[in-house]
Amino acid sequence: IFSFAIAMLLSWALGSLADAYSNLGGTDEDVAATYRVLEFTRIGALVLLIGQVFASVVTAVVTTHRMVGPTVAFRQAIRSMIDGQYGRKLTLRPGDAFNEIADDLNTLSTKLAQRQVGNTGSNAGSGRYEAVNS
């Protein structure tokens, strides 16, 4: 919104300057040439600022997508572990944030799956988990 406001202000100011200059005395060729330069500058600045706004929006969407996407995957992985489904691998897209945390969560899930298999005989049917010191 701020960039759009700057673009509109700049466009209005350069348009007003071009109109004011065209009302001054001087040869018609000089006035026309100056008017063309000011109009080109006004339109160019407007296009550049609109492009900057578009690039900012695209960057914001991509960045938030790369941050929020992994959090959804983390919640699903944690919920599956809460439900006792250990050993499932969490896979994030290349370039997503938190890949190291996903690796750690995968390691945790694998270790919990190994402990569950090791404790199946002694805790079968107890429904409890014992604290294990590593």
Image (cartoon, rainbow, N blue to C red):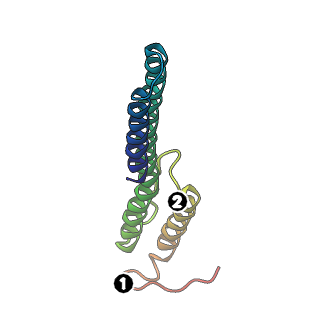
Q: Residue 1's x, y, as percent?
A: 37, 53
Q: Is residue 98 left or right of residue 77?
A: right
Marker disc for residue 103? none
**Residue 101 higher or lower than 49, as above or below:** below
Marker disc for residue 127? 1
Q: Pick whichever of labels 1 and 2 is earlier in the sequence.
A: 2
Amino acid type of disc 2?
A: Ala
Quarter containing the C terminus: bottom right
Q: Residue 9's x, y, as percent?
A: 40, 46
Residue nearest the viewer, comparing 134 with 47: 47
**Residue 121 higher or lower than 31, as above or below:** below
Residue positioned 43% across, 55% down in the render:
64
Q: Residue beneath label 2, please?
A: 102
Q: In this view, does 131 lie to the left or right of 8?
A: right
Residue nearest the viewer, comparing 120 with 134: 134
**Crowding near the residue tagged with mark 1, few <14, some 14–19, many ≥20 C-alpha atoms within 10 Å:** few
Judged from the image, the secondary structure of the residue bearing numbered disc 1 is loop
Residue positioned 57% across, 83% down in the render:
132
Amino acid type of disc 1?
A: Gly
**Residue 26 higher or lower than 104, as above or below:** above
How far separated are the C-alphas under marks 1 and 2?
27 Å
- Total label count? 2
Q: Residue 114's x, y, as percent?
A: 52, 67
Residue nearest the viewer, comparing 20 with 45: 20
Residue positioned 36% across, 63% down in the render:
76
